[in-house]
Amino acid sequence: MSLLLLDTASLYFRAFYGVPDSLRSPQGEPVNAVRGLLDTIAFLVTEHRPERMVACWDDDWRPAWRVEAIPSYKAHRVARAGEGPGGTDVEEVPEALVPQIPVIAQVLEALGIARVGAPGYEADDVIGTLAARQVAAGGGPVSIMTGDRDLFQLVDDAARVRVLYPARGVRDPDVVDQARLAEKYGVPTGSAYADMAVLRGDPSDGLPGVAGIGEKTAATMLARFGTLEGILAARDAGDPGLTKTQRQRLLDAADYLAVAPRVVRVATDVPVAVGPGTEHDDAVPRDPADRAALEELTARWGLRSSVDRVLKALGSR
């Protein structure tokens, strides 16, 4: 059975910035992120007709185990909630988006669309876990809808895992398979993409990478030595396939390279129960789970056209 995994935060952030904030509730509150996400779901269900679907959720957008390994991980996105010693670090989110997030959660629940997160893990980890389970069970194809290139590491043609990346918008996404990775990044597999990402780093996630080694150099190294482990073995052996400068840069980054793979690679063993008979039934619903609640939310937030599009998409699968 085909599985569609939604990187929900990536999609509602994209909707927030891409849909006019003139879209308001009857009381005048912004609902552009809610409306945009629902319209995205309606389009994806109509276009791809998945049999199972999960809205994957960030229960922890900056897990402690990643921060412990690399303290700069997402540090530039941290905002402080509360004053004094009782304050906590939270993700910096636009003020107008904050109240829309619980509305999104409520509407998904009323629709009966599985929304799954796990304490101590990011949505990427939930996606990685559910994709790995589908592959291990010999299930159908997996499509991952995300605006986050980190998830390119999950691409696997043999396992039928691909990423839909909305470079030009959700209605015309890049279909990222291994051919696309080779064409765009010079790496042959999703796993090689993850190794490249470790070497290259990612300022948007606070990952420093190896100084002086960018995307093209990383891809060239991987083409020669196969994997990050192969590159590090060549470094330690003084392999002439590395220049003196490259070897020194890899040595200088030894501490980072010892921990970065665990931070960059998504977890595939998140403790979540998903599927028939569990708390999170991932079958794409034909009818709302709670029609009365959905009607109340639709009226309260002025979501009629977007909710109707989702209902039509669900009913016409």
Image (cartoon, rainbow, N blue to C red):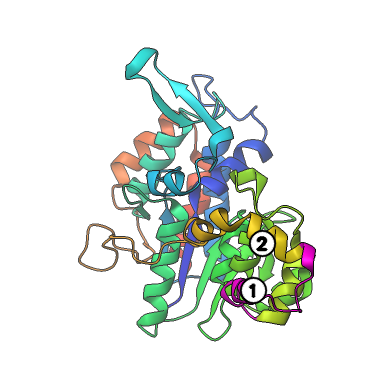
Would you name the residue on which mark 2 appears? Answer: 250
Choose between 120 and 238: the one closer to the eye: 238
Q: Looking at the picture, does residue 39 appear above or below residue 2?
A: above
Q: Is residue 244 found inside the magenta-colored segment of the image?
A: yes
Question: Left of 140 or right of it: where is 176?
Answer: right
Q: Which corner quadrant of the image does residue 221 belong to?
A: bottom right
Q: Amino acid at mark 1?
A: Ile
Q: Which residues are magenta?
A: 226-245
Q: Looking at the picture, does residue 88 appear above or below residue 44?
A: above
Q: Main secondary structure of the magenta part?
A: helix
Circle 1 packing at 10 Å, graded few (<14), some (14-19), many (20+), is many
Q: Looking at the picture, does residue 260 appear above or below residue 83?
A: below
> Along the polypeptide, which appears first: circle 1 or circle 2?
1
Mark 1 vs mark 2, CA separation in Å? 9 Å
Q: Which mark is residue 231?
A: 1
Identify the residue at image location x=48%, y=46%: 307
Report the quarter where the N terminus lies: bottom left
Q: Which corner quadrant of the image does residue 174 belong to?
A: bottom right
Report if the CB atoms under discs 1 and 2 are less than 8 Å apart.
Answer: yes
Percent x, y for residue 117? 35, 51
SS at mark 2? helix
Identify the residue at image location x=49%, y=50%: 8
Percent x, y for residue 294? 36, 42
Identify the residue at image location x=62%, y=73%: 192
Circle 2 packing at 10 Å, graded few (<14), some (14-19), many (20+), is many
Choose between 213 and 157: the one closer to the eye: 213
SS at mark 1? helix
